[in-house]
Amino acid sequence: MNIISRSLLIALIISLSTCYGASADEAFTSFQSDWKNQNDRVWIGPEYWANPMEDWQLKEGRLECTRLLPRRNVHLLTHRLGKEKGTFECSVILGVSNFNASQKGFAGFEIGIQSELKDYRSSLLRGKGIQIGINMQGEIVVPSARIIEQDNLGNTQAVQKALQGEGVKLSLFYLKTNEREESIKIVITDPSSGKLLHTMQMSGRFASKLIGNIALLSNPLPPHNSKQKKSTYWFKDWKVSGTKLVVNKEHTFGPILYSMYTLSRGVMKLNVQMPPMGEKDSQEVSLMYSNGKKSRAFITSQIDKHSRTALFTIKNWNDKKDISYRIVYNMKNRKGKITSYSFKGIIRKDPVDKETISVAGFTGNTDPAFPNNLLAENVKKQNPDLLLFTGDQIYEGVGGYGIIRSAKAGNKEKAILNYLRKIYLWGWAFRDVLRDRPSIVLPDDHDVYQGNIWGENGKLTPNGMKDH
């Protein structure tokens, strides 16, 4: 990455909204975060995926990265950059907690994040994009060798001062005027006064790289001296818009992540997986299902504070027919507004009338092909009566960012969240087959972060356990 230092004023920005506007016949769409109205919690919301989940939180209306390590990002799930020509704008207010002017690294955007599979979920884990941001020195950080214009309107101290206070507004504008001309303009302003602090413009052929996910990026480097202040970034009021955006509201994930159930001898057990909700969020999940004679049953269950699951156990279940169910969770924001979320499925009848039942077996699930679209679709086509996961639903490396083994020194909650993040990926990949048929899920060695523990009876190795 190139770090851009002070320069003389070259030009003022004139009518960005006009220069980067869309024509009337183009499909313009937009998105804006609502964190200011959300309760404090680790889980950011159904429109986002955080890498890694345990290093982010919503606090007092802001999105905060809580760990001083690089490559932390938050992807927008419902909006991404498509192949279509058009415009794109992105802005966010960002600031720094515990400011250290000598600390390296930067924060901002990563755009056009695409993996080899070109799937929006695969790109969460294995995608790469263009990174643009601001560093602690108040300078704009951009990809190398494409700068055609840069204006430092005054000095970097103004940007640094704003970062320590109410933050700065970082804006990005992309415009493809024709097959040969493309530009990206970066603008830094004071969010309170609107005062222009810094601008830069790049020119090049970006179109092939601006396809894929959009994310906020926290990319600091820890200071060399452990006694120095450790700065972390915060964000608020994230906006994206333009005619290049592709929207799919069905790409949300949560708050009801997935469900799985068993049915045996007239006893139905259904487990609902939830994300880490906040203390002020509802801790109750509801289940509705047909109880015969056109009536509907309605029961509730509390969310377990560690596993984040809500378990329903119903005896004397009518196992003679398929029964539809609906899981409901009501999420109340800081203003008292309630949004109701639901997740549907079918409890299949007990197939006692079949001479042979079909079972789909799985083992050793890791993440290179996540979200396993081809596998999941083929299982649905086969329509098995039962799903059998025989172990290693996750491996230590799933989802990246390492594992947290120790629960000492107040690290218990981080260790739990670290594990949940990995198992959520498994559930996300298979939730459309889990919701409509019973499943048996057995743990194996890697599911408990202990490779080959069963074969060695848990014997300690002299040099510790190596992840593999």
Image (cartoon, rainbow, N blue to C red):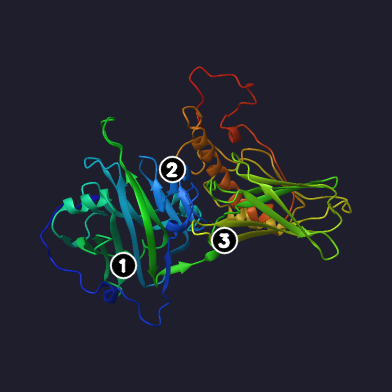
Secondary structure beneath disc 3?
strand
Residue at 10% in and 60% down? 8
Query: Is residue 139 visible to us here?
Result: no
Can see residue 336? yes
- Quick one: 415 or 375, which is closer to the camera? 415
Q: Nearer the viewer, residue 450 or 276?
A: 276
In this rendering, the answer to whether 217 lies above or below 342 is above
Residue at image mark 2: 55
Q: CA distance from mark 3 to mark 2?
A: 27 Å
Estimate how packed mark 1 is, as few (under 14), some (14 to 19) or many (20 or more) residues with alpha carbons within 10 Å: many
The residue carrying mark 1 is 174
Write down the residue under mark 3: 338
User: Which kind of residue does numbered mark 2 sit on?
Assistant: Asp
SS of the residue at dot 1? strand
Q: Residue furthest left?
A: 8
1 or 3: tag closer to the N-terminus: 1
Q: CA distance from mark 2 to mark 1?
A: 30 Å
Viewer-proximal residue among 329 and 384:
329
Marks 2 & 1, CB-CB < 8 Å contact: no
